[in-house]
Each structure stands twice: as C-alpha cells, then as structure tokens.
Image: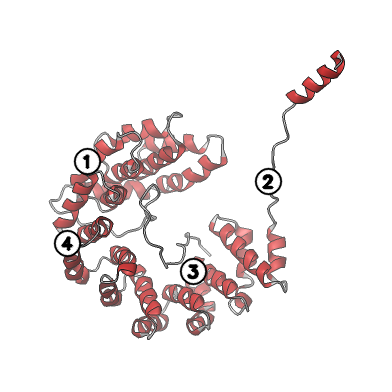
Amino acid sequence: MGLFSWMKKAARQDEPEPADSGPVQETVDELAEALDGPDGAARVDAARALLDRWRAGDVQAAEAIVGRLEGLLEDAEPQVRIAALGAVRMMRKPENLEKHASAVLGLLADRAAQVRTAAVWTAARLPGPAAREQVRALLGSAEEPMRFAAACALSDQRDPAAVPQLAAALREDYRRQEALSALLSLGDPAALPGVAELFEDESLGELDRTLAAAVLARLGDSRGAAHLVERIAADGDDRPIAAEWAGRLGVADAAPALEELAGSDGEPARGAALRALGRLGAPYAEERLLNIATSADEAEDLRMDAAEGLAEIGSPAAIAALRGLADEPGRRSRRCVGWPMSRASSGRCRRSCSRRSRRTRRKRPRPRPRTLPRPRPPRPRLRPRTRPRPESSNST
C-alpha cells in the first residue's frame, strides 16, 4: 500500500460515522389520514399514536383525534373503539364529556369484552347521575369481569358502592392485589373489617400482606403503619412497596428506616425511600436529595427519584435544583424531570408538604387520598392489572 493511499484510508477511518437518525416519525396529518383510511390495522396504529401524543401534550394530536371521536367510537375495529374511549377519558370539561355520553354508554353492551371493560372506566368519568347509576348497575352483572371493572372504576371516583365487590375480591388470589389497590384509592372505612381479616391470615404472602397493611394505614389502623415500618427495615421483596406507601400515607415513624435505606448503595428500594423522604418532609432529607439529584456520578433513574422527592419538598433550593436538571442536555433528563418541575412550580407540593408536616405530628396520622402516580420501578413484579392506562390531566 502506498503512502498516500494509506493516508487517505486513515483519514476516512477518522471521520465520524453519521448518526443513526432512527425511524422517521409520522406527522399528525399522516396519522389523521390513516384514521380515515380503509386499513383497519393502520387505523388502530394511528389512533394509538395520536392518543400517546395527546398524553405527551401534543395539542394538534388532540385536535386530530377529538374531531373524529364520533366515528372512532363506532369503528369496526375493537382496538380503535378502545382508543377512542381512552380519548374521552382524557377530556376534563363536562360539556365535552357530555357530547359523547350516549356513545360511551352504548359501548357498555359492545360485542367485544375488552371494549365493554374500557367503556366501564370511561362511563364512570361521565358527569351526571344517570351514567353513574349505569355503572353501579354493573356491580350486579352476570359477568364477573364487568362486576370487578365497575367496582374498580367506582373506587377511582370515591364511590362507596364499590366496597362489597372489592371486599369479595380479596378472597381471590388473581384479583387480590388489584382489589387492595382500589381500596387504597377509595379509602372507605367500611372495608376495614375485610382487610383486617385478610391481614391476619397466616397463609398470606408478604407482598399481599404489605399491600393490606397499606390499606389499614390508609384507614387509620395502627397495625398497618407498624407493618410498613417493619418491612422497610427488613430485606424482603416487598421492601420497595412498603417504602413507597409509607411515604404516600405519611407514616412518620418510618423516617429512620427510610433514612437508612436511602443511604444503601445498590439497594433496589433506594429510589422509593428517596421519594418517601421527600413526601414526609423528613429532617435532613432535602440535603440528601439535593446531593443525589445534582450528582453526575449517580444513576439517572436514582437522580429522578431524588427529583420527585425534591418536588414534594418544594423549597427554593429544591426548585432551583429541578430547574438545573431540566436544563441538562439529553431528552430523557428533561422529560423525566418535567412532572416534578411542574408540580413544584405550581406550589401544590409546598401546600401538601405543609399539610403533611402537621399531620405527621399526630399520634395516628390520617393518610391523604392517593393523588400521585403508582409506585415507580424498581419494585417486585405484581400480577397483571386490568385497569386502563391512567390518563394525564388536560383541559380539553
């Protein structure tokens, strides 16, 4: 090989390879055109894509799917009808929900079981007593999946009519964890006897027992809070769940165990402990959370957990740190810190933190209703849930 040809080859090797731009994302207009097309599979993909973009805050995607909702709710493809029901759940204005109430209630009798289940969740969101009564009537349905879906949907609306069906579901292994989660959302004292009986069952697994303990704590039973503290200190598979719910339910006695867990490198439940410390407003928690959130040496997931804890504290230093994280290069960092940043900036965290600090001085704290997202990974894998994906808050 000659000198010049070698130099040319070396120069070509030193040139950076072009970055992989990845698949080209379809535009909203292209997705809208697919929704109007004859290809059923393409309509399903387009409806799901537009709904996902709406959840991410894309106003054009919202307009594209809302303008076609009437036809999508009657589409021949079941998955398109399910996506349309999800779009209705995204709406917040009563007048917009009312426009589609008749179609939604009609889908409660759809030929596809998945569509009927999705319609239950959407019908529970509709304004007015008529829709609520139709969902309550499903508690007596001959189909067990419809009865359970109705109970879970009603629990999200804080309707006590869901208690008997959810209490009965506690006896079924494949329904138990979702029933406990629904009772956590509902927070009705009428569920206490059934949950307490389940909690004392010697054959109950630790994951289920810890969820039952969270419900007890939610309902003001001191046995629940004590069990959560015990499981945080233990090295079990249910440790992340115990830490998460101790923070959400304001279990002040868990602070020492959470502090120790938050300082344990490599512990799968460490992120849950960081979030919980922020929710509790524990002493010295802010300094620890600031150090982790702003450290480039920590894993990004852990930094985002610390950011959520800072959002709960909502102090000037916490907000400044969140702004710094939002300005960091990298789409993932900006996306992950968006929710904590918006929550802290709105002042909701500071108000909730103030209420929580007053509450945690009581001997038996009363937990606030669940308003935050479900526990984030890392956590043990639970049984599959039948609930539709939670919708983001929009003003449509």
Q: Of the residues tagged 1 and 3, which is closer to the observer?
A: 1
In front of the other: 271 or 338:
271
Tag 2's secondary structure?
Answer: loop
What amino acid is found at the position of numbered circle 1 in the picture?
A: Ala
Spot the residue most to the left.
Answer: 363
Q: Which residue is mark 3?
A: 89
Identify residue type, mark 4.
Glu
User: In the picture, residue 48 is in which quadrant?
Assistant: bottom right
Label 3, residues with CA under 10 Å away: few <14, some 14-19, many ≥20: many
Q: Residue at x 41, y 39 (%)?
A: 302
The answer to whether 345 appears left or right of 87 in the picture is left
| Residue ID for mark 2 | 22
> Could you tell me the amino acid type at mark 3?
Arg
**Location of mark 1 (residue):** 257
Residue 131 shows in this picture: yes
- Label 3: state its secondary structure: helix
